[in-house]
Image (cartoon, rainbow, N blue to C red):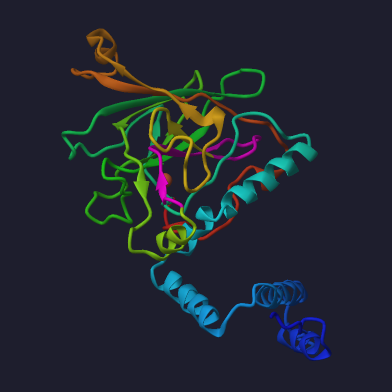
Amino acid sequence: MTVKTMQTADVKDLLEKVAGFNQDGGDERVKKIVHRFMHDVFQLIEDFDVTPEEFWQAVYYVGDLGKNGEAALLAPGLGMDKYLDIRMDAEDEQAGLAGGTPRTIEGPLYVAGAPMSEGFARMDDGSDENAETMILTGQVTEENGNPLVNAVVDVWHANTMGNYSYFDQSQSEYNLRRRIRTDENGRYTAQSIIPAGYGCPPEGSTQALLNLLGRHGNRPAHIHFFISKSGFKHLTTQINLAGDEYTYDDFAFATREELVVEANRIDDPAQAEGYGLNKPFTKVEFNIQLVSTDKPELQSRHERKRALEGEAA
Ligand SMILES: [Fe+2]
């Protein structure tokens, strides 16, 4: 039988002391949030009659999560990144800033300061000779369809093993990471390789919890983007390649219908030659529409800890 203790004076008093309500120093907002958070944890323990064994298991789980560096991987797996997107979409709607290409989650694997190119970039270092060549191209426009010149398209994706350079030290520096400034027609083009999807580390903390939920930890093949231009809302998004087993079953909840893009095999030698290639390739076209805003705080990406952020130009 579950005992009820949450309404007792002892527990109320304990929660207030925990949150520092009886202290002058500290941060008021943090105090309120911690008070609410711990109240809800206590309530959960009561409602589910959590045993000490279960409780300590959870404490050590959090410790392991930090040790494995997986906190920012578990977050999207539990829908938190997606939830923040849902909130930002609703805020945009309310501010009359909806429309344009939809946002989706950033993920934890961006590295700042990738080399900048004008109009075209070769993204792969050529070391994977068995990879399928990808031509990734598109136009950046404003809402009325006018091309946006000098928009910065910051692209990053995994290799054929599903690994990202920097985090995978076996890859060359900034492999599969580039920034491309759009040309006079608002176009960007990248030559790269078709990425593979990937899964959470099988022995990691994230997968351990997903197993208990009966869920897999896989993502479809995808390509990440930041797109920015002064006077326009910064866009964080990614495309999922159509036809992947997980295109509509992404453990990180990043898929949006408008962001599923066909990957088309092109065998026509004339088209290959147009891109300086002498073999068939796969073309991925992603056009991007930005929404104008005069609010400077909406024109750059929100702050979070990112690899090499603030160190590279
Ligand atoms: Fe990713």
Residue name at image x 66 percent, y 23 percent: 143
In reply to whether residue 167 is colored magenta, the answer given is no
Image coordinates for residue 179, horizontal then vertical, percent: 42, 38
Q: Is residue 78 above or below residue 191?
A: below
Q: Which quarter of the rendering shows the N terminus? A: bottom right
Extreme residue in the front direction: 1
Residue name at image x 51 percent, y 24 percent: 287
In reply to whether residue 218 is colored magenta, the answer given is yes
Left or right: residue 285 versus residue 265 is right
Left or right: residue 51 versus residue 291 is left
Is residue 187 at all visible to an observer of this figure?
A: no
Residue name at image x 65 percent, y 72 percent: 48
Q: Within the image, what quadrant is residue 296 found in?
A: top right
Q: Is residue 43 above or below residue 187?
A: below
Total marks placed: 0
Q: Is residue 113 above or below residue 141?
A: below
Give the residues in magenta: 215-236
Image coordinates for residue 23, horizontal then vertical, percent: 78, 89
Is residue 17 at all visible to an observer of this figure?
A: yes
Q: Within the image, what quadrant is residue 19 found in?
A: bottom right
